Image: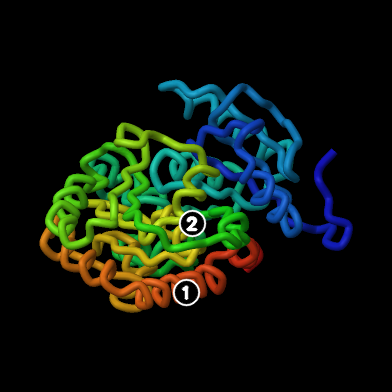
């Protein structure tokens, strides 16, 4: 039987379409996300993962297909079946690309509302720009995880209703952490990929480390010095670091920044993508131009020299997360978008 909230028996049935690969046994954040959403809608999820057809869990109904190069053919067919049998009201496409195409097909066949989401910069994939335009043009509403993405989309689809709020990030455990302290570690959490700009931080730190002999640089992530760690271990490292540095060449709205801010840590980050929407230079952290090692080194020097300023920046960042990026705020924004 379908999931029903007895206090709201006419909730909209919403089909989420995406390329996310779900592990229903291990992805614990799904529980909070979909159980929260199921208080205002009936969620159905079409994505990738271990073959699952109609499993009811976390207040949602999951339809997962194994990843393959022909994924979108059976996925679109299955989407038609779900729309027809489950009487879907709203289709949510996770991106304007293949998800947007599949969503537009289902919209045209079943005449349902289509919401197209933007989680990353589709423009970096030039060969798919026409596909993105098709997705935007068929959308009834567009949701972006950051303002800068909405600005780009409005050049293509200026007259659509836009909703701007970040991806679901379960920050409860970070916000609930009690034993926070400012240690002597400058922390980077990422992976060994040129887009993450690790080399800029390594060089910048080498320029100032003699002036700050008590501090050390910690590089955490796949392919980096300290390797990939569990979320629990990352949280443990974050709660005792001095600051987090995000020197990326390209970014959307990095979850790692929200996690560190929830732990009241100041951030030094490159001025790119959605990062300036989180970091106000000189208020809750510092920004520097992409690849500018000298500027990054100087911002590090300033921050490491003034612990009181670092703690105040961290406090302001935590207030921002509580006010705008809590789980409750995400659910409120999402349900408002669906039901508007």
Residue 300, x across and y down, in percent: 23, 64
Residue 142, x across and y down, in percent: 47, 60
Name the one closer to the observer, 267 or 206.
Answer: 206
- The vertical placement of 107 against 285, above or below, is above
Question: To which residue does mark 2 refer?
Answer: 239
Residue 334, x across and y down, in percent: 60, 61
Q: Residue at x 60, y 67 (%)?
A: 329
- Quadrant of the rendered image containing residue 270: bottom left
**How dense is the environment of label 2, judged by Cα within 10 Å: few (below 14), some, or many (20 and up)?**
many
- Quadrant of the rendered image containing residue 40: bottom right
**How dense is the environment of label 1, judged by Cα within 10 Å: few (below 14), some, or many (20 and up)?**
some
Is 82 positioned to the left or the right of 311 in the image?
right
**The N terminus sits in image quarter:** top right
Name the one closer to the observer, 303 or 68.
Answer: 303
Closer to the eye: label 1 or 2: 2
Q: Secondary structure at mark 2?
A: helix
> Can the viewer see residue 217 in this picture?
yes
Q: Residue at x 42, y 77 (%)?
A: 312
Name the one closer to the observer, 325 or 268.
Answer: 268
Numbered tag placed on residue 252 in the rendering: none
**Most distant residue in the front direction:** 214
Question: To which residue does mark 1 refer?
Answer: 315
Is 321 positioned to the left or the right of 271 in the image?
right
Q: CA distance from mark 1 to mark 2?
A: 13 Å
Q: Residue at x 71, y 38 (%)?
A: 61
Q: Secondary structure at mark 1?
A: helix
Residues at circles 1 and 2 in contact by the CB criterion of under 8 Å: no
- Quadrant of the rendered image containing residue 82: top right
């Amino acid at each position: 039987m379908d999931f029903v909230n007895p206090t709201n028996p006419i909730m909209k049935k919403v089909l989420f379409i995406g390329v996310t690969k779900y592990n229903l046994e291990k992805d614990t954040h799904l529980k909070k996300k979909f159980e929260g959403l199921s208080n205002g809608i009936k969620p159905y999820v079409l994505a990738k993962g271990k073959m699952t057809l109609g499993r009811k869990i976390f207040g949602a109904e999951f339809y997962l297909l194994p990843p393959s190069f022909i994924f979108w053919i059976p996925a679109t067919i299955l989407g038609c079946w779900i729309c027809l049998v489950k009487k879907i009201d709203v289709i949510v496409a996770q991106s304007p690309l293949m998800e947007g195409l599949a969503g537009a097909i289902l919209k045209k066949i079943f005449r349902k509302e289509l919401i197209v989401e933007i989680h990353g910069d589709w423009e970096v994939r030039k060969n798919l720009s026409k596909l993105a335009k098709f997705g935007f043009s068929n959308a009834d509403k567009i949701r972006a995880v950051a303002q800068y993405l909405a600005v780009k989309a409005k050049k293509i689809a200026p007259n659509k209703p836009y909703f701007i709020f970040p991806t679901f990030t379960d920050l409860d455990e970070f916000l609930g952490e009690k034993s926070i302290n400012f240690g002597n570690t400058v922390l980077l959490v990422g992976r060994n990929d040129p887009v993450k700009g690790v080399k800029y931080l390594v060089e910048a730190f080498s320029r100032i480390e003699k002036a700050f002999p008590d501090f050390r640089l910690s590089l955490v992530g796949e392919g980096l010095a300290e390797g990939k760690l569990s979320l629990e271990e990352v949280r443990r490292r974050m709660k005792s670091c001095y600051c987090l540095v995000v020197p990326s060449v390209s970014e959307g709205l990095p979850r790692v920044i929200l996690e560190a801010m929830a732990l009241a840590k100041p951030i030094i980050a490159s001025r790119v993508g959605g990062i300036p929407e989180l970091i106000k230079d000189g208020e809750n952290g510092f920004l520097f131009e992409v690849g500018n090692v000298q500027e990054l080194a100087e911002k590090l020097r300033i921050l490491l020299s003034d612990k009181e300023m670092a703690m105040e920046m961290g406090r302001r960042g935590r207030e921002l997360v509580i006010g705008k990026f809590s789980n409750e705020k995400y659910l409120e924004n999402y349900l408002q978008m669906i039901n508007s």
